[in-house]
Amino acid sequence: MNFELKTLSLAAAAAHKCDLLVVLVPEGFLPGSDVLSTMVEHALKQGDLEVKPGKLLQCYAPAGVAARRVVLLGCGAADAHAVRQAMQALSPSFKLPSVKRMALVFGTSAQRGAIGAAVRAVADGSYVYTATKTKAEPRALLRVTLGVPDAGAVQPEFATATAVAAGVEFAREWANRPANHATPTLVANAAKTLAKYPGVQCQVLGPTEVAKLGMGAFLAVAQGSDQPLRLVELRYNGAARTQAPVVLVGKGITFDTGGISLKPAAEMDEMKFDMGGAASVLGVFRALAELRPAINVVGLIPACENMPDGKAVKPGDVVTSMSGQTIEILNTDAEGRLVLCDALTYAARFKPAAVVDIATLTGACVVALGGLRSGLFASDDMLAAQLLSAGDAALDPCWRMPLDDEYAEGLKSNFADMANVAGRAGGSITAAKFLQRFVGDTPWAHLDIAGTAWKGGAAKGATGRPVGLLVHYLLERATVSTVKPKQKTRSRKSVA
C-alpha cells in the first residue's frame, strides 16, 4: 500500500477522484464556501453529525464530489489520540473490496502526532494476513492520500509515520506466521532480506559458532529441538564509526511449548507469538532502512524453539552462561531469560551507549498491565524517561516498573550462582532482575511485551508493538546526537 501527502483544501478534496473520501471534522470547525464545508455545516446544524471522535455520517455519490463514497468523521480535538479513536471507528471500511483508493482530508491543521495516528490506523485496519492461506483475498486498499492545509509543514512526521507503518507490518507478518513457517532459520533469512537496504548489514551464527562463544544458556534451551538455533546480528550504520551504537535484543523463541515444564494445551498455539521481541527488532530495522537517521544501531536476535524432546534440558539442570555465571534451571518454561542473558552478554562487545531488550517474557506482566501498556524496567533514569516519552509520542505506551535489589532474593540457588525463577510474587520484576545480572554498568532497559505483542480471541494476531516506541526513541536519540553545542565566543579589544 502506498501513502502520499498532498496539500489539499476541502474545495480541492471535492475534486479528488477516489473510492472513499474521509473528511475529519474537528471541534470548532470553520466552514468555507465549498461543497464539503456546506455538507459538514448542514450535518452539524441538523444534529446528524457530531464532532466527538468516532461519530460519522456516510454519504453516497453526493453532488459536486468526485469520490463515490464520502464519510464525514468527527475527530474531537484533532490530536493524536482523538484521530486514532476516530479512525478505528471507520476501520471496517479499509478492507472493503471496492475501496482501492482512499483520501483522508483534515478539516483543520493537523496537530502534532495526528498524521502518524492516521497513517498507523489505516495501515493496521487494512492489513490482511495471506502467507499460509490459499484463497485469501489480498489487501484491496492500494493508495491512500493524506490531504492537509500545508504538506510541507508535516512532511517529516509523515515520513516517520509511513516508515513506522512499514516496520510494524513487517513485524506483524513474521510474528503471525505459524512456527513451521517461521523457524529460527526462516527468521534469520527474513533478517538477511533487510541487508538489501543501504546501511544495513546482517550476520547469522549457527550452533557451532554459538557453542564456541560459550553461550551455554542459549544452547540449553535449543537442545530439545530438531530446528537448529540461529543468532542473528543486524547492524544499521547511519553515523560515524566512533559513535557508540544502541543495541536492541529481541527474544526469538519461534515456538514455546514450555519444554519439560510443559504448558497447558489451551491456547498453546499462541506461543508462535513468543518471538514478538525478535519480530519487533526486524520491524525497527525495516523502518530505519526507510528513514536513514544519523545513529548506529545493532539488533541481536537469539532464535530457537523450546521443545520437550528427550534431549531437552531438565528442571534442576545447571548450565553455564556466556558471562561465566551458572544458572539452575528450575522451570524450563522460563526460557526467554536464558536466551536473552547470553545475548545481553554478547551485546557488550559492541561497547553500546545503551541496551534495550524486548521480550514476551512473563504472564505476570499481563496480569499487572493488561494489553494496554508494555512493562518497562530500566537501570538508568534518563533511558527510562526517553523510552516513556517515545512510547507516548508513538501511541505505543509503556509503564515503568520497579527494580529494587530485594526482588532478586528469590533467585538464590543452593546449586548455582542463581536460579532462573523466583516465586510467583512479582514475577515480571524477578525476571527483569535476572536479566540485569548480565548487563553490567551499561544503561539498560527491558520491555516486557507479553501483554502487548499480540491479541487473542476473534482479533487474534500480532500487533507489531513496540516498533513505534523503539523507532521514535532512536529518532529522538539521533536528533540529540547531531545537535552540536554552541561554542562560546570571546570578545577581543580592537587594536588601534
Image (cartoon, rainbow, N blue to C red):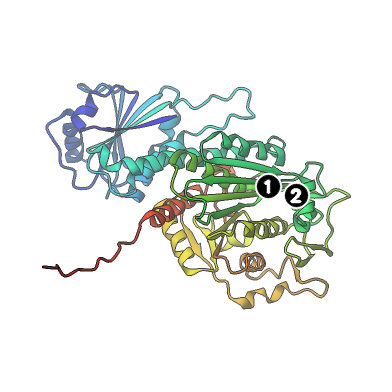
Q: Residue 246 at x, y = what percent?
A: 53, 55
Quarter where residue 216 is shown: bottom right
Regarding residue 342, the answer to whether it shows in the image is yes
In the structure shown, which secondary structural element does the residue marked by tag 2 occupy?
A: loop
Mark positioned earlier in the residue sequence (2 or 1): 2
Regarding residue 54, the answer to whether it shows in the image is no
- Amino acid type for the residue under numbered disc 1: Met
Q: CA distance from mark 2 to mark 1?
A: 7 Å
Residue 288 vs residue 52, the one in the foreground: 288
Residue at horizontal 67 percent and vertical 40 percent from the top: 188
Residue at horizontal 66 percent and vertical 74 percent from the top: 408
Quadrant occupied by the C terminus: bottom left
Q: Residue 235 at x, y = what percent?
A: 57, 46
Residue located beneath label 1 in the image: 271
Quarter where residue 66 is shown: top left
Answer few, some or many: residues within 10 Å of disc 2's Cα (few below 14, many 20 plus, some between 14 and 19): many
Q: Residue 110 at x, y = what percent?
A: 27, 44
Q: Residue 176 at x, y = what percent?
A: 61, 39
- Amino acid type for the residue under numbered disc 2: Thr
Are the residues tagged 2 and 1 within 8 Å (C-beta)? Answer: yes
Residue located beneath label 2 in the image: 257
Answer few, some or many: residues within 10 Å of disc 1's Cα (few below 14, many 20 plus, some between 14 and 19): some
Q: Which mark is residue 484?
A: none
